[in-house]
Amino acid sequence: MDIVTGAGHDAVYMASVTPTAMIFVPCKDGVSHNEVEDAKPADLEAGCNVLLDAMVARANHPGEQA
C-alpha cells in the first residue's frame, strides 16, 4: 500500500539531533487528523508491533544504524 503524506510532526524537529521515522496505520476512508478518524484495532496492533520490533532490534544492537 502506498501512503502519501505531508506529515512531519515532531520528527521534523527531532531529525536534527537523531534519526527519525514515522509509523502509519490505515484509517477508515483515509481520514486523518479529524474527529471521525478511526482505525481497526488489528491495524493499530500491527503499528505497535512495528515500533516494538524496531525498539527490540535497536536494544539488541546498540550503536548500529538501521
Image (cartoon, rainbow, N blue to C red):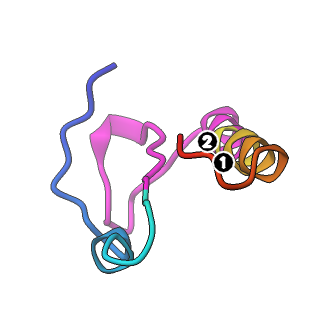
Residue 16 position in % (x across, y down): 31, 76
> Which element carries disc 2, helix, strand or loop?
helix
Task: Report the mark closest to the observer, 1 or 2.
Answer: 1
User: Image quadrant of residue 49?
Assistant: top right
Assess whether residue 45 is covered by the magenta stretch: yes
Residue 8 position in % (x across, y down): 26, 66
Which residues, given as a range, are shown in magenta? 21-49
Q: Which image quarter holds the N terminus?
A: top left
Looking at numbered disc 1 in the image, what kind of residue is underneath it? Leu
Residue 11 position in % (x across, y down): 36, 69
Assess whether residue 44 is covered by the magenta stretch: yes
Q: Foreground residue, 16 or 63? A: 63
- Residue assigned mark 2: 47
Left/right of residue 60 with respect to residue 31 in the rendered view: right
Circles 1 and 2: CB atoms closer than 8 Å: yes
Residue furthest toward the top?
A: 1
Q: Foreground residue, 29 or 62? A: 62
- Residue assigned mark 1: 51
Taking the spot 65% from the left edge, 38% from the top edge, the residue there is 50
> Which element carries disc 1, helix, strand or loop?
helix
Looking at numbered disc 2 in the image, what kind of residue is underneath it? Gly
Taking the spot 32% from the left edge, 66% from the top edge, the residue there is 34
Q: CA distance from mark 1 to mark 2?
A: 7 Å
Image: 21 above or below 16? above
